[in-house]
Image (spheres, grey):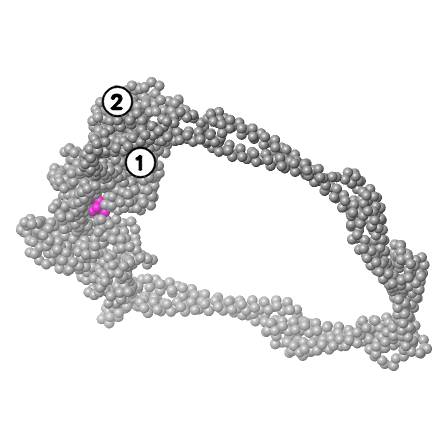
Amino acid sequence: MRISRLDLTRYGCFTNQSIAFKVKQVGNSDLHVIYGRNEAGKSTLLNAYMDLLFGIGGQTPFNFLHPYSTMRIGALLEFADREQEFIRIKKPQGSLLDKAERQIGEGVIQRELGGLDRERYRTMFSLDDAYLQEGGQSILASKGDLGVLLFSASAGLADLGQRLSEVKATAEAFYKFHAKKGDLRDLKTRLDEIKAQRTELDTQVSVYAEMTKTRDRLQQGYEAAIEEDGRTSARIAEINRLLLALPEDAELNRLQDQLSVLQSLPKVPASWTSDLDLLKKEEAVLAAEQLRIERDLSRVKDEIEGLAVDEIALRVQTGMGRFKELRSRSVGSAVDLPAKREERIARKGTIDGILERLERASEKNPERLVLSVSESGGLHRLIESWSGVASKRQTTTEEREKAETALSMAKAAVFRQDDGSDTAGPGESEIASLSDLLREASTVDYVRKASLAQNALNAASSRLDQQLKLLSPWPGTVDELVAMECPSIEQVQSRKALLSDAAAEMNLCDGEYDRLEKEREDIELQLSAISAATGVLGDQDIKKFREERDAAWLQHKQDLQAESAQVFEFALQRHDEAIDSRVAHLSDVEKHRQLQVKFAYLTASLGPAQQRWEAATEAHQLMRNRIAEKVTKISPSLASFSTDLVNLENWLSRRDKALELWEALVAAEQAKTDADIELAGMTISLADALAKAGQQTPQGSGIKDLIAIAGQIVGEFAKQRELRKKIAEQETNVAERRREEEKAQKEVDEWNRKWAAAFSSCWIGELALPTIDTVREILSELPRLETELTELRSIDRRIRGMESDEEELHCESKRLAAALNLDSEGTGSEIAERIEAYIQSVQDTVSALDRKKQEQARYESEKRDLAVKCEQHTARKCEMVKVLGVDSLAEIELKLAEIKKRDSLTESVANQQASIMRILGKGTLAEAEAVLGSAVQEDLNAEIAKLNGMLPDQQNRARELYAEFCKAKDRVDAVGADSKIAELEEQKRTILIEINDRAEEYLRLRAGSLAAEIALQAYRERHRSAMLQRASDAFRRICSDQYTGLETQPNGTGETLVARVSRGGSRTDNELSDGTRRQLYFALRIAGYHEFVRNHQPLPFIADDVLESFDNPRAGETLRLLAEMSGLGQVIYLTHHEHLCEIAREVCPSVNIYTLEQTALEAVVN
Amino acid sequence: MALPYRFVHTADIHLDSPLKSLALRDPDLAQLIGNATRKSFVRTVDLCIEEAVDALLIAGDLYDGDQTSMKTALFLAEQMERLYQHGIETFIVRGNHDAESKITRELVFREGVKVFSSVADVVRPKRPEGSVPVAIHGLSFAKPHAPESLLKKYKAPLDRHVNIGIMHTSMSGAVGHDPYAPCNPEDLHASEFDYWALGHIHKRSMIVGKTVIVMPGNPQGRDINESGPKSVSLVTVGDDRKITVAERFTALAQFKLVHLDASTITEWSDLVNAISEALESAQDGIQADHLVARLCIDGNTPLAWRIRRDQDLLLTEAKFRASSIGNCWVEKVDVACSLPASPGSSTSDSTDPVVELRDLIDKEILGTDAFKLQLVSIADELRGQLPPECRDILGKDQVGNEKRLSQIALEGAEDVLARISVERSGN
């Protein structure tokens, strides 16, 4: 690293100051000496550099001028690969900024410092006197190995030993000899816990085998006990059964005896007992049934014989179709007929009402009144067309009257116009010519035209007068002006240009002259200034002095007197002084000479310049005279314009304008005359025309009056003509309207004729002059009349039909009554009712006879069925009789009772046998009997008593065995197939792996740190000698007069550094003088710096007046060492001793020396 | 009706044999994959039931020799019972571990399980009428060692039958390992059996020739040395006597060595990302529920010493990345990185004191007797404190012991220099 520039922006006594360190040139040293008096800020600068690198401390004393918040240091630092700007402000954190004032990490700088912190940098390579001593003492005072200290400090591996201890501690966290704690111990404890858990939970295979064996043995014991118990219980049960079976066996024997008596009875079906009951009941029922059937048959036969039928009536009945039809109609019409008759009366009434309204109440034949379609259609059409015909006639009449009124009004108007005068009006031609004139007079306003021409004339005259006034000082009239001879404006302009060119030439010459003159004056001034300032004399003066000198010499040669000598001496001296002065100011003399040449040239140039000016002036004047002459020729009054061509040019343009106005005035006068002539001509023409039209006008009437009179005459004439045209039109109109009216009247007459004709053919014609309204009413009533008449006819038809049916029924009834021998008196209906009643009675008799015959047939069938049943009954009775050998049902019954008793005994015997077999638990009777045969009750009772005594003991034994077996089985079952043990095993395994892993790591770290410790020792040994040699060399060079170098001496615990004295012997640091001790300390730093640079990028080495106590030779040698060291890295030395700068220059010509002042920093080279 | 004969073939179950991984220090993972040998065996039984096979063939090593808990045996019996309930027969031969095991003597299987004795036997399972008849041959280890081939002791293959042999064998054997009933594939092909159901070697292999020879490997790897996918074989003997073998994966956790070359990596964050990527790609193709990875980082990188020093941080970082991948766990990070050789400077004249120290250690210290003696005494002291199970940490004999110690010293020096150096430069 290198400092290129240090900015003390606001720090200590500095404000906005900056020191730029010279760039190192190849082959030159990088040694920088900064000189400054006391209080110039050297220590401040050193501190600023440290603060830049490491930050401004919390309680820094460098705030006496700039408060903390504004303190600021900057620098441009060179690194191996780049340059970088830094800014440091005072802040607890983030105080390092880049050029753009962004915060950057401290690492950017720290990385470049090779592991040095602030304290170590100060102790080693950033020294003031205090640090030089303190650090030196601490190096030497330490009891340890000097090599270690020097090496550690310089190589930045000071805490390597500490790091190694940390590594070792890391390893020992796992295991340490005799330590009470440690990860290994914890892991082992955990292993023990798992082992204990496993022992508690697990069942080993061998244990399991034992458990199963026990379980099986107990099971066998238990089963044996149960078996014995079972046998005893079984015997007890068997004896009990025998004791139960013995009485049953006795009962069996008794039953068998009873049964043997009834064995001879035949076997009959079990159903016979119930069959017998049925047969008994059936016998009684059959007898009763037979009696009932016989009785019913005789009754029915009697009833059939009592019924007789009228055969004739049956025959007649077949021919009664028509009678029934008529009879049913007659029943209907008995209700309908009166209703129809009432309806007829009502309808008749309605018709009479209509006839009444038609004023035909007495009409015999109302049918006649109904009109045919063509008749009523014709009447309707006429009625519809009437309103059109009538309204048309009315309209035409009204229009005709209106036209007549209009005609008479038009005629009246013409009459009023004629006013009764009989004078003939003016003719058409007169009026036409008058009208033409009038149109022309009104188109052109002659009066106004004349007055406008007059106004234009006045204006033109006034403008001309104005313009003439502008021509002053010229006093003439218009005519003179017109006659005047003038040059054109172009000519004047040309003159003007020529004159101006002449004037310009004149001025140019004048300026040139002035310039030359001024320049000459300047040179003159310079010449005198040179002479005055240097005492240089001009060549003329020299020449003059030389001549005077030569003259004096000649005089003196001649006189050889003291006065002449004095004169000659004066002249010679004056000449020599002048020459000396010239020699001393050679450049000034040269300049003086050049100026003189230029002065001469300028003086020569002034004459021609003046001649040129004079010629130009003359030409200009000549031209002006010529112009004045010409102007006077135009008019003497314009003489003043001869010098002022611009004014003349203006006057001439004003004259042109006046001439233009004069021409306009002449034209206006002509226009005025023309207008007056036109006005007079028109007035005369109008007066003539009016006279011809018969209108006398007063003499001298103005054209306006004439126009008014003529307009009135022409207007009146036109109005008359219009009125007459209107009368003719109205007359035509009246004639047209009259024709229309007549046509409408004819249509009315035609209608009236058709109206009368329409009635002539029908009954309406019988009415006296029927009106349209009457006829319309009649036509509206007629359809109702027609409807009512139709209905009436229909009713009449129905009534007649019913009356005819009634008559036919009467005849038919009478005929039938005769055939049936019935009474034929009375109305049809009465007879018919009688017939119907008789026929009904005959039919009833026939039905009754049918029913009785059916009843008889049923009874006969029942009789046949009964006979069959009787046969079956007898057959069944015979079967029993045959088997049992008895006749009657009662005997059969007795036999069956005996058979039943025998069957019951047989069943009881079988039941008894089964019961004995069940009690004894035997399959066959023979087995049971075999057992019973040998059984003796008394023996059995004795045996059972004994067995009952044994049984409880046996049972207790079995229970005990069972409980033990269960326990053993539960133990086996409890082993289970779960994975708890496997889990514990897995945990154990994981811990073992961890122990292995950690143990290996432990060994690695221990082995590694052991190797590193040994290596470190060897390394230090190796480097110590090199460094000591360098320190020794440096010390020898500094103190060559007294010491030959340094060496170490063992001192029991370590080594001591001693200085070898030239004269022999050695001295420890305590024995050295103050200065020499400092030199020793300095030598150690130089050696340290070389060692540091061997391993790291170089850092600036800064020292602040540490050579104060060095004598000049030693200081010189030290500076030489620093200059050599600056070949490795930048070296900055701050001092307030001027002589050190001199020494530095001597020992190192390429040193850079800077002067530091309190107010400003200024780099001064060499 | 002719039906194919189907069976599952497995071996080397080593029931309740613990997983050996530092990863299990994580209680969550221990919960997930603990007892993996059991869970994997349950999966095998589940497979038999799901596939409704005819039989399960176990070619030895049901449990470890030192297994003494009866719970293990009872668990096995439980699983056999499940198979029996589903009408699946089990055929077992005992391997070397089984012969050692006391469990073997106490465990009595019920109906449906055929454990072949040390006398060769053949069983003919009931087959539906018209199906190809099958004969299953077996022979168990009587003792933990069987230095001779067992093949010649097997009964001759039955005529017309599909003959399946179950055998526990180390095959041709690996150098340095005891031979267990050795035999070679040629002999097996010559045996005229149709299928050899082998066991013992924990890595799966299959040879199809005249006969189909399958070594299924263990169904659940137990440590990083048993890495790779683990499976059982689902075998079908068709009507046409054709044998097809399908591999079915059964492991809960699969161990995998994940290698990472850090040569091109210069930034810590890049390294962590590279680890993440390496783990992600390792996760692909894993045939188990969980991946347990051991990261091995090597190559020359400027980060070498920092990786050494901050190995614990790196492990934490790797575990964190693994957890975000999901079902991925890191048991350990092994570091074999070195610093790249800096161009233009040989070790001898380098100005870096640490480099010089290292040079000194390599050349002048590690080889010295004094150093070795001190190291041996450190190791002996430690060994005395370790639990008995760990006392072989450096090897079982003196030669191995010394060799291992030298290696540890070499690695240790590297580690320690890394620690002091990296801290010095403040990286």
Q: Residue A991 location in percent, x, y? A: 21, 42
- Same chain for mark 2 and mark 1? The answer is yes
Position of the C terminus of chain A, as image quadrant, is bottom left
Q: Is residue B420 magenta?
A: yes
Say which residue appears at 15% left-offset and 50% top-offset. Answer: A150
Q: Residue A1009 location in percent, x, y? A: 16, 44
Q: Which residues are magenta?
A: B416-422
Q: How many marks?
A: 2
Relative to B295, residue A1105 above or below = below
A590 left or right of A562 in image: right
As shown in the figure, which amino acid type bears the numbered disc 1?
Val
Is residue B245 or residue B340 the one in the foreground? B245
| Quadrant of the image occupied by residue A781 | bottom right
What residue is pinned by disc 1? B42
Q: Residue A640 location in percent, x, y? A: 61, 76
Q: Secondary structure at mark 1?
A: helix
Relative to A1026, residue A423 above or below = below
**Label whose residue precedes the other's in the sequence (2 or 1):** 1
The chain letter under disc 1 is: B
Residue B283 in sight: yes
As shown in the figure, which amino acid type bears the numbered disc 2?
Ala
Is residue B33 or residue B241 the one in the foreground? B241
Q: Residue B369 location in percent, x, y? A: 12, 37
Say which residue appears at 29% left-offset and 30% top-offset. Answer: A250
What residue is pinned by disc 2? B120
Q: Is residue B403 magenta?
A: no
